[in-house]
Structures are given as C-alpha cells and as structure tokens.
Image (cartoon, rainbow, N blue to C red):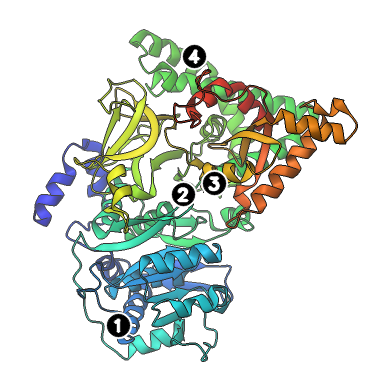
Amino acid sequence: MTSNQSATSFLANISERERLALESLVDYKNVESLPEIWPLAARQFGNTIALHNPHSKPEVKITYSQLAAQIQRFAAGLQTLGINMNNSETLPYGERVSLIADNSPRWFIADQGIMSAGAVNAVRSAQAEREELLYIISHSGSTALVVEDIKTLNKLGESLNELPIKLVVLLSDEAPPTELKFPVVNFSQLLEIGSNNTLVAIKNSGETLATLIYTSGTTGKPKGVMLSHKNLLHQVKSLGAVVQPEKGDIVLSILPTWHSYERSGEYFLLSQGCTQIYTNLRSVKGDLKKFKPNYMIAVPRLWESIYEGVQKQFREQPAKKQSLVKFLLEMSQKYIEARRISQGLSLDHIHASVIERSQAKIAELGLLSFHALGEKLIYAKVREATGGKIKHIISGGGALPKHIDNFFEIVGVEILQGYGLTETSPVTNARRPWRNLRGSSGQPIPGTEVKIVNPETRQPLPMGERGLVLLKGPQIMQGYYQNPEATTKAIDSEGWFDSGDLGWVTPENDLVLTGRAKDTIVLTNGENIEPQPIEDACLRSPYIDQIMLVGQDQRSIGALIVPNLEALAKWAENQNNSEKTDLESKIVQDLFRQELNREVQNRPSYRADDRIGPFKLIEEQFSIENGMMTQTLKIRRHIVMERYCDIINAMFAK
C-alpha cells in the first residue's frame, strides 16, 4: 500500500468534523518513522521552545531547531560507537538499547536518537527494582545502555558483566567510570562525538520495530510489548481528531515519559509545535499557576488531588459561606445534568425523547442564574488554580471517578477521558470536545474498531449489551517480544486484540467500560497491580485461608479475606481470651494488618503500590457451591466483586 492509499484508508469512516480537525494540523502523512518528524518540525517551528525543564539545575530550554540537531548528534555518536546494526542477520529486530531513565529533555533526545541510529529501545524508569531492570536488559537482548546517571549504573552492578553490553551512555555529565569492562561516555561526550561524525541515514519502514515497553505479567515476569513506527505514528496522525493544539501552546508534563500514554501524547503535541514544560508532584500546583498550561495529560489521581485541595479550602471558610458554596454546587450539579440531557450527552438518558430533551432545556434555563452566580463567586477562582488557560485536560490510565468528572464540568475545566493499553500504543478511544459524553471513554479514534463479544463464546453482542471489549486498528502492537504464546492469546487470527476489559457501546459508538475480565488492577495513579503474586504471598500467613485483592480505580489495593478460623481460635486460646476471635475487634484487625504488611513486604519484588490498604474479614468461604470459584478452584473475581459490592465500596469510602 502506498502512503497516499494508506492516508485514504486512514481517513475513511471518520466524521466531517474530525476530517476538518485533522486538516487544520501540521501534516505528517508521508512520514514513515518517528525520527523523520523532528527535522520537519524544526523547519516548521524553528526557535519555538520545544522542551523546558524549570526544575533542573541549570534550567533547560531547547528550541525545535536545537532538539532536531541534538537528536541527530546523539544518533551519530551511537553509530560511531557501534550502535547501527539494524540490518544484521543476527539481530532481526535491530540492535536493542535499554533506556533506563526518568523525565527530562535528555530522555526525549535519547529516545529519538536511539531510533535515528537504527536501533530499538527498551524503556523503563530508573526507579524500578534492580532485578526488574536486569531482566529487561537481558530479555530484550540489549547490547548497550542509556542510563540516568552513575547511581543508576551502580545499582545494576556487576551483573552487567554477565550480559553482552558493549557501551553505556550516561544522560548526566558526570565523569564516566573507567574501570568497567565496557566503555562509558556521558551525554556531552556522546554529542561531541556525534558532532564530529556524519549520521548514516536509516530508512525505517512503518513495520520496523521502534520500541519495547515492558508491562507486568500475571507470573510476575514483565512482557515486552513490541510497538512499531506505524503503531506510534498512528497516534501522531490521529490524535488531532481529539484535540487541535497550536504552535506555542503550553503543555505541562508530569507522567513518566517512558509510559506509552505520556509518550504518545508527547510525540503528538510536540509534532504540532507545543512547548512542553516538565513538572513533578511536589511542584505541579505551583507550576499550573506559573506557566498557565493549555493542555495537560495525567491520571485520575492528579485531578482528585486538585479536587481535594479545593474542597479543603471550602471547608476552611466560615459556616455561612460553606453553606452558600454547597448550595451553589448542588444547583450547578442539577444544571449540568439538565444541560447534558438537552444536548443528548447524558449517559443516564441515552435514549431521551425530543420531549424529554425539551423539558431538560427548560430546567437548564431555570437553573442558569444559580450557575452564573457560582461562576462569579467560586468557579472562576477555582480555574485560576489551574492557570486559567486550560483548553482541555486529557485523562487516562484508569477510570475517572464520577464526582471528579462532575466537579470539573461545573467549574468549566473540560476533561476528555480516553482509553487504551500499552499494547494499543495506547489510545483507542477518547471523548471529543463536541461529544464529551461523561461516564464514557469516548468514540474510537480514526482507523480504530471496537467490538463487544460474549466473554465465553466470543460471539458479537448487540449494541448496548455488556461483554468483552476487542480492539482493532493500526495501533495494535506487533506482539509480545519472544513470547508467541502470549501474543496468540492476546491477538486473534483476524487481528482483534483482547483488551481484558468489559464494556458496552452506545448508539453513537461511545465505549462505556464496566469492569475488567482479567485480573490486573489499575490504580488511580496509573500503576498496574497483578493480584495473584501478592495473594500468594499473603496465603503464607497461617491466619489467612483465602484472599482476593480489589481496588480497580482506587488509590490503593484492598483485600477481602476469609480467615482460617481454626488457626485464629488457636491464637486466641494462646492469648487466654476466646473473645479475641471477634473478627471486628481491634486486636484481631491489628493481627491481620501485621500479617498482611509482613507477607507483602517480604516479597522479593515488593513495591510501595503493592501494600494492601483497607481489608475486610468475611466468614463465608469462596467455593464452587456458592458460585465464587470455578471447577478448577480459581476465584471468580467478577462474581465475588458483585457479591460483595457494598462491602468493597464501604472499605474505600472510609
């Protein structure tokens, strides 16, 4: 297929509004690999600031012209030092380079420099556990490393001597160690080498592997998601159907830059001439006010923290003002609900008649004066906390709580919720400014198909029925690296990817997610938790008979625990107090808290997000007879979730 045919196919089946939106942006339809973008962007945007890190010492500002030049110098330096074997028969995917570092302009330069040199990068945070990093380096077959600094290199230690590493690049300017078995150069040294040598242009096709992003697996071993240039470019070429940034728009960046969600967002926004400013959790509230961003990409937890900060300010007001604020928020809630119905954008009234929409319009007009008063007294001030110039907030990495969605709509800050997975590069669906259906994850982005099927039979279900979400499009991964069995399980013969999520679609093709068919728990900070290894660890406690972790779209994981009543009775006997078998008593609760903390933290790959927060002791065992276990004695998680829905909600409401 030619590039023109590809573009025609890509633009098929999209709305006229989306077509016009895409046509308003800088066009990269003839680009076949990511590195081709940056020389074009340099010519288009020149002295516009591309990357700005106000928190580094010294402060860093890089224009589009400088960015393209540094990417080329980085790539030329790698090639000069031997990283250019993309056509080697022994390296069918190209030479792999592990990029182990965190947010900074230099990360972006390294990422695109590695690809420009003709290599594939395998990415992860420098904060990840040592064993996980060594597994990624080994499994990916990396022959070179780009690391944050000497501290990161030292963390990897002597184990690197057992791997075929022939080069290490520090992203810092620290003096490289000289006693190691492989050469080490720092960032400035590599750029100097590159400036004295000519970059050999590498012509990558869309099918060429671009990156490996490792995600958690149910066995505890991460899987390498293989994303091609075509996969990633689909995001660059299609996200303009969701938002239309302009040259010089400010983007505040807080998510891990190696994560697929942040990464594809950066590629797209920078392709359109935006200025990306790096922030962090400690500085974000101040940076919102200082830099007044137009766009921000983040997970629901950030919006929750802003909401909680506003609520705290409300609670500190005098009683009469608190009452006024509460009253106006209640009236505005009714106002936005009526407005949604009148506009045909209420998920709870998806089939509203013309009469119902007309009645809602009358109610909307009747409530407008209250909402206008709230705008004058409260909402404009709340927007000032976000800088006051937000065009759109992009939320993903987990479900957006209903009350957060409602609050930001009331105060006039529009959140566009999206959906996708690392395996889908990641965006497959997103709400549009002109169709912001709250409670949904939006319509498919261009070129993407969504199919809802019966989880057991895999037969398509009628519109509106809940089932397993399957996805298809140019952004679907090539597969899991060196794991054909997992690839076959995830992608069927027709190219449909099994998302592992349950949901349904509206008459307008908006995707509404209702839960997960597979076990992975996604917290509001975007972290993925695989419950099985943690549950297995907890079962080492003599007092825990069965356990199931919960916490989808919560701040922390929680647990439903069936205690071993016999062991608990024995413990109480040793305590000389039979009343200590009361499951709600403080002493029993303290015992289980101690057990959970010890067993979870004793896991070799323990992370802070693995800690179990709230838990509930229940007496009824999970069994085949009560429908909570399969014939093979596996917990039927969705059944347990439904059975204990009220208890789980109460656990996290505390």
For marks 2 and 4 on the same chain, the one whose residue lies earlier in the sequence = 2
Query: Looking at the image, which is closer to me, 455 or 564?
Result: 564
Q: Does residue 458 appear left or right of residue 365 in this picture? A: left
Which marked residue is nearer to the observer: mark 4 or mark 3? Answer: 3
Q: In the rendered structure, which amino acid carries the disc numbered 1?
A: Gln
Between residue 31 and residue 578, name the one nearer to us: 578
Tell which circle, 1 or 2, labels the residue nearer the N-terminal end.
1
Provide the residue designation for mark 3: 533
Q: Which residue is mark 1?
A: 79
User: Circle 3 sits in a helix, a strand or a loop, which is it?
Assistant: helix
Query: Which kind of residue does numbered mark 4 sit on?
Result: Ala
Number of numbered tags placed on the structure image:
4
Q: Position of residue 221 (x, y in %)?
A: 45, 55
Q: Amino acid at mark 2?
A: Thr
Is the residue under label 4 in contact with that under label 1 (CB below 8 Å)?
Answer: no
At 35% from the left and 70% from the top, the residue drawn is 141
Whether tag 1 and tag 2 are in contact, CB under 8 A, the answer is no
Q: Nearer the viewer, mark 1 or mark 4?
A: 1
Is 277 left or right of 536, judged from the image as shown?
A: left
> CA separation, marks 2 and 4?
54 Å
Which residue is tagged 2? 219
Residue in the picture at 57% in, 23% down:
645
Q: Residues within 10 Å of mark 1 (few under 14, many from 20)?
A: many
Nearer the camera: disc 1 or disc 3: 3
Q: Is residue 558 above or below residue 327?
A: below
Which label was assigned to residue 363?
A: 4
